[in-house]
Image: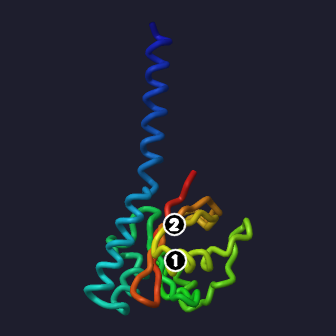
Amino acid sequence: MVRPFAAIAAVALLLLTFSASADEHGTRDEAVAMVKRVEAMFKKDGLAATLKAVSDRSDTEFHDRDLYPFIYDMNGTCVAHGARPALIGKNLIDLKDQDGKYLIREMILIANGPGSGWIDYKWPHPLNNKIEDKASYVEKMGADHFVGVGVYRE
């Protein structure tokens, strides 16, 4: 009688742990929704206000768990970053991930091509700084920029 109860308790604990772990990560739908919020602010308040809000970690509209936006110009210069402010002002057109993927170049191709889409690459997680698999949704913003928000995959 004790063993079936212990097995049920173990499964329940495992499910609870998995559920709590899943809640720590943003979803693909939440990433797309955040990109749309950035674009709405851009249309309403302009570029300067949007760049400031995206780079302000205390702005909960643009910072949720491991979700944060980033904005680049079409030359590959980071103009706003929700997790790594040290990147702002740097041209990262030649930045490669651990697998050799030119991720900013590919994001520009998406923005200038279909206008929006997903890209897979490796990037440091903002909470633990470990290199992890990431998928980012990127969308052209105005004529000269693109915005992206990514999700970390375990």
- Identify residue type, mark 1: Gly
Q: Callout 2 environment at 10 Å: few (<14), some (14 to 19), or many (20+)?
A: many
Q: Secondary structure at mark 1?
A: loop
* Number of marks: 2
| Front residue of this view, candidates 128 and 133 | 133
Position in image of residue 54 (x %, y %): 40, 80
Tag nearer the camera, 2 or 1:
1
Does 116 appear above or below 154?
Answer: below
Q: Quadrant of the N terminus?
A: top left
Left or right relative to 102: residue 25: left
Residue under numbered circle 2? 136
Does 33 appear above or below 143?
Answer: above
Q: Secondary structure at mark 2?
A: strand
Residue under numbered circle 1? 113
Left or right relative to 134: residue 49: left
- Identify residue type, mark 2: Ser
